[in-house]
Amino acid sequence: MNNPGYGFALLIVFLVLVAQFESLASHFVILASIPFALAAAIYALFFSGTSLNIYSQIGLVMLIGLMAKNGILMVEFADQRREDGASVRDAIASAAAIRLRPICMTLISTVLGALPLILSSGAGAEARQAIGWVIFGGLGIAAVFTLFLVPALYALIAPLTSPRSVDYARYRREMAESGEKEPQGLPA
């Protein structure tokens, strides 16, 4: 698995998270679930007897994006709840409960969509099966990590940071104290 594609995929995920979040805690929580998904996919390849080839590596890069998306769904909603004044525990509990359905819908549809790849036969079946096992095993097992590890990490790490609304309130206070005019188009 000495492939620069994984590092590039993680870098892209990190840059997207930098653009979306303004907290290192959110970055860490989302990125921490990705290695568990990759390990789950490798185990699925091992148990199915499929080799780690270029096709399974393509599936692993796709798995990085899917796991990040699932983490983003939960962490973004928890951050919004914290901005509204909820405690960390209440924010992540409501995020986990409310985002359970969209995350499960994505996981189930993607895992079931991998079944035809796994069950394929004929020319090129080995390539399709490699991608199918990475998706099926990686997401199937990694669902546990998304649904339990992300909230647990968020509950541990988020109290170390302040919600974005606190930073924005400080910004407005400093702008008022300096006498500078606040830029147009910012939220109230």
Image (cartoon, helix red, strand yellow):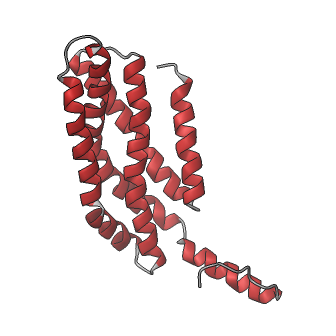
Residue 48 visible? yes
Residue 35 visible? no
Could you say where residue 20 lies in the image, as x and y percent from the top left?
55, 58
Which residue extends farthest front? 123
Which quadrant of the rendered structure holds the C terminus? bottom right
User: Nearest the camera: 123 or 27?
Assistant: 123
Q: In this rendering, is residue 175 above or below 5?
A: below
Which residue lies at the image location 40% right of the left edge and 67% below the top edge? 78
Residue 43 occupies quadrant: top left
47 with respect to 175 (left or right): left
31 with respect to 93 (left or right): right
Residue 118 occupies quadrant: top left
Q: In this rendering, is residue 186 above or below 40?
A: below
Could you say where residue 157 lies in the image, as x and y percent from the top left?
46, 59
Could you say where residue 152 lies in the image, as x and y percent from the top left?
35, 56
User: Nearest the camera: 86 or 129?
Assistant: 129
Which residue lies at the image location 46% right of the left edge and 68% below the top edge? 79
Could you say where residue 68 lies in the image, as x and y percent from the top left?
43, 47
Q: In this rendering, is residue 9 above or below 108?
A: above
Number of numbered discs: 0
Which residue lies at the image location 26% right of the left edge and 10% below the top edge? 123
User: Nearest the camera: 148 or 116?
Assistant: 116
Which residue extends farthest left? 119
Q: In this rendering, is residue 171 above or below 52?
A: below
Which residue extends farthest right? 179
50 with respect to 33 (left or right): left
Which residue lies at the image location 35% right of the left edge and 37% below the top edge? 37
